[in-house]
Image (tube, rainbow, N blue to C red):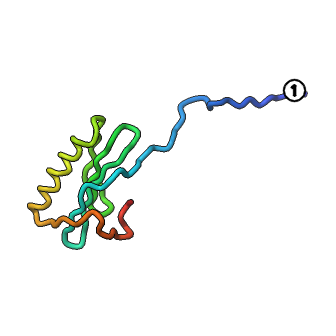
Amino acid sequence: MALRLRVSHWPPLGPQKRPSRLEHVRDLWVLSGIQSKCVAGLYRNDFGIELRIRFGNELLESRLSRYGEAPLILIAEEAKQELLKQGWAELPLNAPRSPQDPH
């Protein structure tokens, strides 16, 4: 009868998946349209800082910066100005969110 030993490896062998980091840093602006909201927010992920512009639950824009928030704030401001020209209205950042909002 052969004796089998079970050897465990630490760390486990081969490539490992780890959960992706997506940490909400702050919202930059909230705009209101007819029965909908558009939110621009900054998030920290595994690769740097990400700007996410959401329309309801839909992601409209995602930009990554490894050079801090400043380039993303400029992009968000350009998008906001374009939406304001189209008739959207800016809401205060502390306005109540609907339960469907992702964060």
At x 25%, y 54%, the residue is 28
Q: Quadrant of residue 99?
A: bottom left
Q: Is residue 10 left or right of residue 95?
A: right
Q: Is residue 80 left or right of residue 63?
A: left
At x 35%, y 38%, the residue is 48
Name the residue carrying label 1.
2
Image location of residue 74, percent across then percent down: 18, 46
54 is higher (above) or lower (below) than 5: below
- The residue most toward the left is 85
Image location of residue 53, percent across then percent down: 26, 54
At x 22%, y 42%, the residue is 70
Say what amino acid the circle numbered 1 marks: Ala
Q: Is residue 13 left or right of residue 90?
A: right
- The residue most toward the top is 2
At x 32%, y 42%, the residue is 49
Q: Quadrant of residue 100?
A: bottom left
Q: Tag count in the figure?
A: 1
Camera-nearest residue between 4 and 37: 37
82 is higher (above) or lower (below) than 21: below
Badge 1 local density, few (<14 within 10 Å), some, or many (20+)?
Answer: few
- The residue most toward the right is 1
Element under disc 1: loop
Image location of residue 77, percent across then percent down: 17, 51
Q: What quarter of the picture does the N terminus occupy?
A: top right
Image location of residue 40, percent across then percent down: 26, 55
Camera-nearest residue between 16 and 81: 81
Q: What quarter of the picture does the C terminus occupy?
A: bottom left
